[in-house]
Image (cartoon, helix red, strand yellow):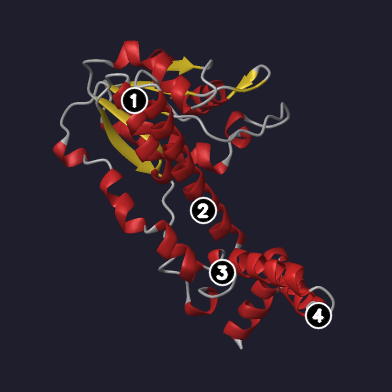
Amino acid sequence: MFELKKILGAMLMPLPFLGMLCFITLIIALRTNKFSAYIGIIAISCLLLISTPFIGQKIIDPATQLKYTFPSSKQPILDKIVVLGCDVNPNPQLNANSQLGNCAKSRLIEGLRLANIYPNAQLIVSGGGYGKVTNSSLMQQTAISLGIAAARIKQNPAAMDTADEAKLLAPTLVDFKVALVTSASHMARASNLFNAQGVDVIPAATDFHDFNAWPAHKQYIPNADVLLAISRDMYEKIALCWITLRRWIDPEAL
């Protein structure tokens, strides 16, 4: 009864419920416009399939991301900890930490963990935002509220994307031991861009996605969290292809 309740509850969520409704509607539409209906059925079927933990896990392949975990036992010294920006939700009525999105919080927590392990390392928080509210300022305020001395923190508020972050921070990072903190799916591209600027970073990934531990009754039901993880993974693959294309056209491109 418990699993049945969970299955029914999961199936009534917007993604699986509306997805199946579209699928059924397209099946009915086969009587009048077969070509359009077939295209629709293929599209909605692919959307529902990649949104299931079972299929999503195979696309993301979380095992390959484990190489980006930070080896603190093998790293006795660290000079700088760079936390890359992510999502923000500006609202002056909320505390700084409540204005950071889940992705940004995950990255900042890993940065603070390393800051506690390496008390002499400088914490660099990066990322622009909307208007006067930046990712870096919200991260700095949150870090201070959690016990990190303001003197240890440096902001990089002008960067609007990863390429900006690498370009603007590179002059202060070259020849230092640098831990780069970002999401596991983002680490390959971020490391690539920092390396292109002459900065040899040590990956310190966070925000991993692994659906293997999800119970069996959830493995084949479309889930919005899985779709979000797949979307981020696909975005990073497209972005890496774009970098490769730009460098093929212009070898001096970042």
Residue marked by disc 1: 194
Give me the residue at 21% from left, 41% from top: 71
The spot of residue 68 in percent (x, y) is: 29, 44
Residue 253 in which image quadrant: top left
Q: Quadrant of the N terminus?
A: bottom right
Is there any visible trace of residue 153 in the rendered image?
no
Q: CA distance from mark 2 to mark 4?
A: 32 Å
Residue 229 badge: 2
Which of the marked residues, 2 or 4, is nearer the chain's N terminus?
Answer: 4
Residue 234 badge: none
Mark 2 near mark 4, Cβ–Cβ under 8 Å?
Answer: no
Amino acid carrying mark 2 in the image:
Ala
Which of the marked residues, 1 or 3, is nearer the chain's N terminus?
Answer: 3
Residue marked by disc 3: 49
Which of the marked residues, 1 or 2, is nearer the chain's N terminus?
Answer: 1
Mark 4 near mark 3, Cβ–Cβ under 8 Å?
Answer: no
Local SS, label 4: helix
Q: Badge 3: how crowded within 10 Å, few (<14), some, or many (20+)?
A: some
Q: Badge 4: how crowded within 10 Å, few (<14), some, or many (20+)?
A: few
Amino acid carrying mark 4 in the image:
Ile
Give me the residue at 59% from left, 66% from top: 46
